[in-house]
Image (cartoon, rainbow, N blue to C red):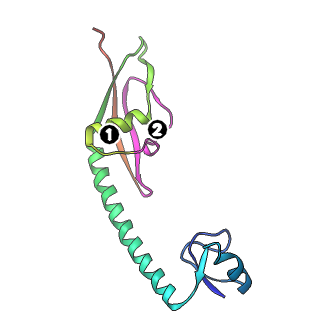
Amino acid sequence: MEVILKKTFGKLGAEGDIVNVADGYARNYLVPMQIAVRSTERNRRILEHEKTVLASLADKTRGVAEELAGRITEVTCTFKRRAGENDRLFGSVTSADISVALVKELSIEIDRRDVQLQEPIKDLGVFTVPIQLHPEITSDLKVVVVREEDE
């Protein structure tokens, strides 16, 4: 029996694939567990329509991510932190700090996990931090850490 997979399923195939399986396997497991539907003309038309909708949505998402990447590369985030004599910070600048700074600077919310900081910044200086906006699009943010002046 031919079925259309609704979900990626092990070695059988990816979501949207049309695969040939044993009748009993399809009737007793794949269809009741909503992993697959029977491959009829109507279901194939629905699948093609969903693929076109998802492709246009992916194009829009990519366009928005490219626009955000352009805005992020133009911005410099400056952090004032207390530091010791050898320019080591008392504390650090983390991906969460950078995410909050982007909200303040650009009014865009970037998840802290999308800030690709290998380890927290613990020194004064200028750093380039990659921001993952889309699986295919990464933007570089300039981060400057300066000494906080004591009053």
Q: Which residue is mark 1?
A: 102
Q: Is residue 127 left or right of residue 19?
A: left
The residue sitting at the top extreme is 151
Assess disc 2: are there few (<14), some (14-19) or many (≥20) residues with their C-alpha within 10 Å of its C-alpha: some
Q: Element under label 2? A: loop
Q: Is residue 15 above or below residue 114?
A: below
Is 123 magenta? The answer is yes
Q: Nearer the viewer, residue 94 or 9?
A: 9
Q: Can you give x and y, in whole percent of width and height, for residue 131 in the image?
A: 40, 45
Q: Quadrant of the C terminus?
A: top left
Q: Nearer the viewer, residue 93 or 142?
A: 93
Q: Can you give x and y, in whole percent of width and height, for residue 31 in the image?
A: 63, 78
Q: Which contiguous range is marked in magenta?
A: 111-136
Give the spatial CA distance, label 2 vs label 1: 14 Å
Measuring 28% from the left and 55% from the top, which residue is drawn there? 67
Q: Can you give x and y, in whole percent of width and height, for residue 63 in the image?
A: 31, 61
Q: Nearer the viewer, residue 98 or 137?
A: 98
